[in-house]
Amino acid sequence: MIIKERRGPQEIPSSSMADIAFLLLIFFLLTTTMSMDKGINIVLPPPGQEEIEIPKENITNILINQAGKVLLDNKPFKIRDIAGFAERAIARNKNMIFSVQPHPKTKYDVYVQVLDQLKMAKAKKISIANPTE
Amino acid sequence: MKLERKTRSKVEIPTASMPDIIFMLLIFFMVTTVMREYDGLDVLLPRAQEIQKLESKREITHVWARKDGVVSINDHVVPVKKMRQLFYAELVKKKGKMTVSMEADKDAPMKLISDIHTEMREVNALRLSYATLRKGGNNQ
């Protein structure tokens, strides 16, 4: 009896709080997806601006055929060589526009590779033509 | 010397503040977590090097395009020609600030991609991001 009187005021046990917090922490760690959304950002042209007159020397045509072969200014090119070419073209002419023209059956993968190369060359002006045969 | 050592109390790492530290971490993760909202379609993303992060998760509309031409916007499967209504609804919901994250299969034909571009342009949804994986790495 004497011992009971000596006891201090009752407290909520807090020793397990760390464990509870740990459990919650692990739950959020597992469910967190850090910056899942990554990709190549582009801005599309507004509607109704199909045709603009551009001097020929400011355009580099990049044609991609069905099989994924790339024709750059009418010369066949390896995809990984496009960045170097584009860089040189921009150095020569700051207003150079790269017009990417895929075939309707061109695989998206090849198109993304080409865009990636242009982005590597820091090309700002990229035009995407509607796929034509 | 030996005697002195014996009388010394055991040195321990103080653990009293551990719950506080854990709580701090917990709160950090709670604030940064955005639960994955959509299941999406079954696609194999292409890989690229020059990839950028998308800024705000709340402004993103997800579009999936499978190689057989099945397209979904935020988990609603729609025909390509009807995409513009959904894009417009999303654009209104997000008060004009919208970025479309396109998760297209790497074998999807460009015709499909271009049709989606057209649908986006019709309703003035112009900011687009081609979702890709990082080249060379095994990360997601």
Image (spheres, coloured by chain):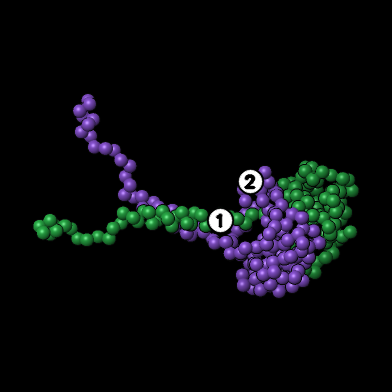
In the displayed orientation, state which residue is furthest to the front: A1
Question: Up-down: is A72 above or below B8?
Answer: below
- Is residue A83 shown left or right of residue A9? right
Q: Colour of chain B?
A: purple
Dot 2 falls on a residue whose secondary structure is: loop
| Figure check: A71 above or below B65 | above
**Alpha carbon separation for disc pair 1 and 2:** 16 Å
Residue B138: give its label.
Answer: 2
Whole-percent x and y of residue A19?
37, 54
Counting from the top left corner in percent of width and height, residue A73 is at 87, 48
Image marks 1 and 2: residues in contact by CB distance under 8 Å = no
Question: Which of the 4 image quadrants contains residue B5?
Answer: top left
Amino acid identity at mark 1: Thr
Most extreme residue toward the left is: A2
- In the foreground, B37 or A16: A16
Q: In green, which chain?
A: A
Chain letter, disc 1 residue: A
- Which residue is depicted at the point 30% across and 56% down? A14
Q: Amino acid at mark 2?
A: Asn
Say the numbered circle drawn on residue A132. Answer: none
Q: Residue B101's spot in the image, x, y percent?
A: 67, 61
- The quadrant of the rendering that contains the N terminus of chain B is top left
Q: Hey, which quadrant is residue A125 in on the image?
A: bottom right
Residue closest to the eye, B106 or A80:
B106
Residue A33 badge: 1
Label 1 SS: loop
Relative to A132, B132 lies left or right: left
